[in-house]
């Protein structure tokens, strides 16, 4: 079973694509305003699916902050266990 996605891992994944340090990721920021394009979002989704979290691009696109992304991911992860 893959290691679960943690908030720290989530922040680190975002930071990698935003060219920030994990502690610089503002969870209240809108992902599109932060600079994530659709290709990066798809790449993140694939990475998170490897941890057992199943989300779609549309589900993430409907949410307007990284905090809302994390809420969705963590809820899905709990449901999968």
Image (spheres, helix red, strand yellow):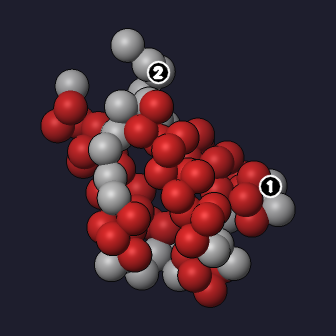
Residue 36 lies in quadrant: bottom right
Q: Residue 44, how many percent across, how many down? A: 56, 52
| Numbered label tally | 2
Residue sitting at x 29%, y 38%: 77
Q: Is residue 24 visible?
A: no
Q: Tell whether 28 sits left or right of 39.
A: left
Residue extending farthest to the front is: 39
Q: Secondary structure at mark 1?
A: loop
Q: Is residue 79 visible?
A: yes
Marking on residue 21: 1
Q: Quadrant of the C terminus?
A: top left
Q: Residue 29, how many percent across, how many down? A: 56, 79
**Label 2 Cα crowd, 10 Å radius (few <14 / some 14-19 / many 20+):** few
Eyeballing the image, is 57 above or below 43? below
Eyeballing the image, is 57 above or below 23? below
Marking on residue 3: 2
Residue extending farthest to the bottom is: 33
Eyeballing the image, is 74 above or below 1? below
Residue 64 lies in quadrant: bottom left
The residues tagged by marks 1 and 2 sit, at their Cα atoms, a distance apart of: 22 Å
Q: Select label 1 or label 2 by which is in front.
A: 2
Residue extending farthest to the top is: 1
**Label 1 Cα crowd, 10 Å radius (few <14 / some 14-19 / many 20+):** few
Q: Earlier in the sequence, mark 1 or mark 2?
A: 2
Q: Quadrant of the N terminus?
A: top left
Proximity of marks 1 and 2: CB atoms separated by less than 8 Å: no
Q: Residue 69, how many percent across, how many down? A: 40, 63
Q: Secondary structure at mark 2?
A: loop
Q: Residue 34, how many percent across, how many down? A: 66, 79
Name the one closer to the observer, 37 or 13: 37
């Amino acid at each position: 079973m893959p290691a679960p996605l943690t908030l720290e891992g989530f922040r680190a994944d975002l930071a990698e694509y935003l060219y920030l340090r994990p502690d610089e990721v503002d969870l209240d920021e809108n992902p599109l305003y932060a600079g994530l394009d659709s290709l990066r979002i798809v790449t993140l989704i694939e990475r998170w699916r490897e941890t057992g979290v199943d989300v779609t691009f549309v589900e993430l696109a409907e949410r307007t902050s990284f905090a809302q992304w994390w809420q969705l991911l963590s809820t899905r992860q709990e449901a999968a266990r």
